[in-house]
Image (cartoon, rainbow, N blue to C red):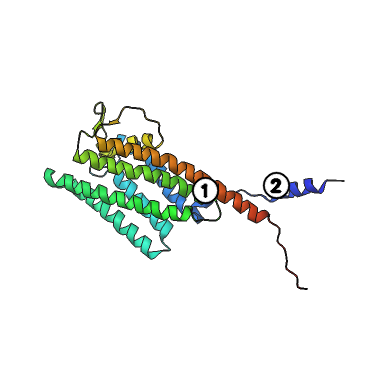
C-alpha cells in the first residue's frame, strides 16, 4: 500500500509550476528598475567603445531615462510619486544635455545642477522602494528585485556625489592617469561609478583613492551604508519569510458557539 505522504508529495511535485522569469516583467514592478541598472552596467561600456552613441549623449543620460521609464512603470498608480519622478528625471536629463552645449564657464554650473537633480531623483526612488520593501508582509521575487535595485541605486547616488565633488575639486581623488583609450560618450561620471561600486561592495582595488577629507568621509559612509543595508535587509527579508511561512502553516480553527 502506498504511503499517503508519498502520494501527497508526488501530487505537490506534479502540480508545482515554477513561475517563468519573464512573468515578472508582466506583473512585477521593481524588476524593470533592476534590469535597467544591470543593463547599463553591462552594455554601457560597449555602447561607448563602439561609438553607437554620440559624444554629446552620455550613458548617464540613458540610465536616468531608462530609470524614468521604469519608475513610471512601477509608480504609475500613485499620481504624486509618478509626477515627482517624471519632473526630476526629465529636468535632470535636459539639464545634463544642455550643459554640454554651453560655454566653458556656464557648462560646469549646469552639469553640477544636472548631477544634483540626478541625485535627488535616485534618492527619491530609494525612499519609495524602501518604504515598500520594508513594509511588505510577503516576500516574493519582486521584493527581492526591489532590494537589489535599492543597493544599486545607493551606489548611483554616491557616484553622482563623487562626480559633483570632482567637478568642484579636481584633486579630491587620486587617479593614476587617464585611460589609454577614453570613451567620452560614457560621460564624466564613468570613473566615479566604478569607484562607487567597488566601495559599496568593499572590494577596494586601490587604483582610485580619495584624497580630500570630504572624499574620504563620503567613501567611509558609502561602505558603511552598504554593509548595514545588506545586514538589515537580509534580517528583514528572512524574518518576513519565516513569519509568512508560519502564517500559512497555521491551522485554521473555526469558532463554534455553545
Q: Examine the image and state in which quarter residue 154 appears.
A: top left
Asked whether the viewer can see residue 43, the reply is no
Whether residue 222 sits left or right of residue 255 in the image: it is left
Write the residue at 37% across / 61% down. Answer: 81
Residues at circles 2 and 1 in contact by the CB criterion of under 8 Å: no
As drawn, which residue projects farthest toward the right? 1
Residue sitting at the far bottom:
258
**In which quadrant will I find the C terminus?**
bottom right
With respect to residue 254, does 147 lie above or below?
Answer: above
Query: Label 2 vs label 1: CA separation?
Result: 29 Å
Q: Nearer the viewer, residue 144 or 65?
A: 144
Q: Which residue is mark 2?
A: 13
Density class for disc 2 (Cα within 10 Å; few <14, some 14-19, many ≥20) is few
Residue 179 locus on image (x, y percent): 26, 28
Residue 122 location, x and y as percent? 34, 50
Q: Which residue is more in the foreground, 55 or 245?
A: 245
Element assignment for label 2: helix
Q: Nearer the viewer, mark 2 or mark 1?
A: 1
Residue visible at 45% across and 45% down in the picture: 148
Residue 195 pos. (x, y %): 33, 35
Name the spot of residue 256 as percent of width and height, x first: 75, 70
Instruction: Identify the residue position indicated by label 1 in the image.
Output: 236
Residue drawn at x 48%, y 48% is 145
Look at the numbered disc 1 and give the secondary structure of its residue: helix
How packed mark 1 is, by other alpha carbons closer than 10 Å (few <14, some 14-19, many 20 or more), is some
In the image, residue 135 sits, relative to residue 36, either above or below, namely below
Amino acid at each position: 500500500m502506498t504511503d499517503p505522504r508519498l502520494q501527497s508529495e508526488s501530487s505537490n511535485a506534479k502540480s508545482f509550476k515554477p513561475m517563468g522569469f519573464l512573468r515578472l516583467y508582466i506583473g512585477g514592478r521593481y524588476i524593470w528598475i533592476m534590469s535597467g541598472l544591470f543593463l547599463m552596467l553591462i552594455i554601457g561600456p560597449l555602447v561607448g567603445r563602439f561609438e553607437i552613441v554620440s559624444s554629446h549623449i552620455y550613458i548617464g543620460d540613458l540610465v536616468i531615462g531608462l530609470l524614468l521609464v521604469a519608475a513610471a512603470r512601477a509608480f504609475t498608480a500613485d499620481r504624486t510619486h509618478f509626477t515627482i519622478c517624471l519632473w526630476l528625471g526629465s529636468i535632470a536629463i535636459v539639464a545634463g544635455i544642455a550643459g554640454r552645449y554651453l560655454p566653458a564657464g556656464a557648462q560646469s554650473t549646469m552639469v553640477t545642477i544636472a548631477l544634483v537633480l540626478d541625485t535627488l531623483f535616485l534618492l527619491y526612488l530609494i525612499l519609495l522602494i524602501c518604504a515598500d520593501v520594508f513594509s511588505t508582509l510577503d516576500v516574493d521575487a519582486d521584493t527581492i528585485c526591489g532590494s537589489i535595485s535599492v543597493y544599486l541605486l545607493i551606489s548611483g547616488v554616491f557616484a553622482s556625489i563623487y562626480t559633483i565633488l570632482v567637478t568642484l575639486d579636481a584633486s579630491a581623488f587620486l587617479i593614476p592617469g587617464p585611460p589609454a583609450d577614453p570613451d567620452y560618450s560614457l560621460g564624466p561620471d564613468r570613473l566615479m561609478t566604478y569607484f562607487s561600486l567597488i566601495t559599496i561592495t568593499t572590494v577596494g582595488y586601490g587604483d582610485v583613492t580619495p584624497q580630500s577629507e570630504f572624499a574620504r568621509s563620503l567613501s567611509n559612509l558609502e561602505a558603511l551604508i552598504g554593509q548595514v543595508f545588506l545586514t538589515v535587509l537580509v534580517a528583514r527579508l528572512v524574518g518576513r519569510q519565516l513569519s509568512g511561512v508560519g502564517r500559512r502553516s497555521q491551522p485554521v480553527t473555526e469558532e463554534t458557539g455553545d
